[in-house]
Image: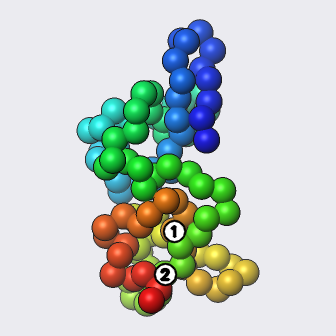
């Protein structure tokens, strides 16, 4: 999803940045947009952040044991109540969640 920020004349791309990965995102130029209450970046998207681009209704389901749920949540995993499964929403999984990918 892209937005246009009034007064700055620059295009922004909004990102889904899990809290645990916020410092990583900042290294590549992402910043918290207080007005929109979202993470954003201006200009080209670095490859390291492409998995944080939002996709509507794109859920990657995961097999996360209960004992690992807190660790998975740090990297953006969420619980889908309707499907009763864990998922990550984005273009691709962060490396830290790959071990729980559905086969």
Alpha carbons under labels 2 and 1: distance apart: 7 Å
| Left-right relation of 85 to 16 | right
Contact, CB < 8 Å: mark 2 with mark 1? Answer: yes
Q: Which mark is residue 76?
A: none
In percent of the image, x 53 and y 73: which residue is there? 60
Mark 1 nearby-residue class (10 Å; few <14, some 14–19, many ≥20): many
The N terminus, quarter of image: top right
Residue 73, image x, y percentages: 45, 69
The image quarter in which residue 45 lies: top left
Secondary structure beneath disc 2?
strand
In the displayed orientation, state which residue is furthest to the right: 82
Total residue callouts: 2
Please, is residue 58 above or below residue 84 in the view?
above
Asked if 18 appears above or below 60 in the picture, the reply is: above
Residue 88's mark?
Answer: 1
Tell me the residue that label 2 is attached to: 62
Could you classify mark 2 by the number of other residues whose Cα lies within 10 Å: few (under 14), some (14-19), or many (20 or more)?
many
Where, by quadrant of the figure, is residue 71 drawn?
bottom left
Q: Find residue 84 and report its horizontal and vertical position in percent.
A: 64, 86
Looking at the image, which residue is at 37% across and 48% down? 49
- Residue in the foreground of this view, choosing between 90 and 64: 90
Q: Would residue 25 be found to the left or right of residue 79 on screen?
A: left
């Amino acid at each position: 999803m892209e937005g246009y920020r009034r007064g700055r004349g620059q295009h922004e791309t909004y990102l889904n940045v899990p809290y645990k990965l916020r410092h990583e995102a900042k290294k590549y130029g992402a910043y918290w947009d207080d007005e929109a209450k979202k993470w954003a970046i201006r200009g080209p998207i670095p490859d390291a952040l492409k998995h944080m681009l939002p996709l509507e209704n794109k859920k990657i389901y995961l097999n996360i044991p209960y004992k690992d749920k807190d660790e998975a949540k740090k990297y953006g995993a969420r619980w889908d109540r309707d499907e009763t499964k864990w998922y990550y929403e984005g273009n691709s999984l962060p490396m830290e969640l790959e071990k729980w990918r559905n086969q």
